Image: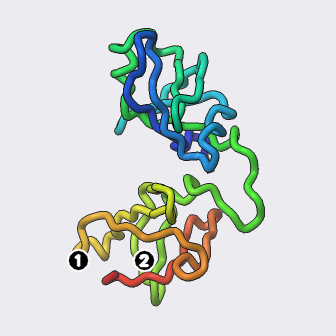
Amino acid sequence: MTDTPRPMGALGSSFGVYGWMKVRSYTQQPEDLFDYSPWFIRQRGAEWREVQVEEYKPHGNDFIVKLDVASTPEEAKLYAGAEIGIRRSSLPPVPEGTVYLSDLVGCQVIGLEGVMLGKVSRIRDYGAAPLMEVSPSDHLAKERKEKFLIPYVVGPIVKAVDLNAKTIEVEWGVDY
């Protein structure tokens, strides 16, 4: 696996007059995002850019952060919506039988009867079961052009994950 940054959060709107920004963390405990360094940010379609966290603090149920790239509200607004990435090598190892959801991106999804459903293009995690956003495989693209979602629920849906082979076997049909 490469050591390119993995999405672990996102920057929200600017906050205050000194370039602070709201933060949405994808980590299980939101404050854990601040344990990792360095941070990388990118706007959709752009390259990752390393940034430094100068300061952060709780704000209601969320957090705000001061990064070295913004000192005014106008500068902070330029980064609204940017992904926050952390290098995989900066993350602690996972316990046996578990995976980082970000490691699933790029894996081939194999459905019922060995049908290649597509590739995981993104993970959506809104608090219930994480969802794998799957781009249809070439042979499925004739029938299904749009990306589709498969819940990441180990047992009833996700049967096996092999990160070395970059495959995920699921109990999921073409017509689901």
Q: Earlier in the sequence, mark 2 or mark 1?
A: 2
Contact? badges 2 and 1 (CB < 8 Å): no
Q: Is residue 87 above or below residue 114?
A: above
Is residue 46 among what the camera can see? no
Would you say 173 lies left or right of 90 here?
Answer: left
Regarding residue 115, the answer to whether it shows in the image is yes
18 and 123: which is toward the camera: 18
Instruction: Bin the neighbour count of mark 2 within 10 Å (Cα to Cα): few under 14, some 14-19, many 20 and up.
Output: many
Badge 2 amino acid: Met
The x, y position of residue 63, in whole percent, is 54, 31
Q: SS at mark 1?
A: loop
Q: Secondary structure at mark 2?
A: strand
Give x and y (percent) for residue 82: 41, 33
| Image position of 103 with respect to 23: above or below | below
Q: How is the image coloured?
A: rainbow
Residue at 49% over, 83% down: 171
Q: Which x, y percent locates residue 156?
A: 55, 82
Classed neighbour count for the residue bearing mark 1: other residues with Cα under 10 Å, few (<14), some (14–19), many (≥20):
few
Q: Which quadrant of the view contains residue 13?
A: top left
Q: Is residue 83 above or below residue 18?
A: below
Q: Which mark is residue 143?
A: 1
**Mark 2 to mark 1: distance in Å?**
13 Å
Asked where in the image residue 18 lies, by quadrant, the reply is: top left
Q: Nearer the viewer, residue 34 or 82?
A: 34
Q: Is residue 109 above or below residue 26?
A: below
User: Residue at position x 53%, y 24% from top?
Assistant: 65
Residue at the farthest front position: 60
Residue at horizontal 43 percent and vertical 64 percent from the top: 119
Residue type for callout 1 = Glu
- Determine the residue positioned at 45% across, 86% down: 112
Residue position marked by numbered label 2 in the rendering: 116
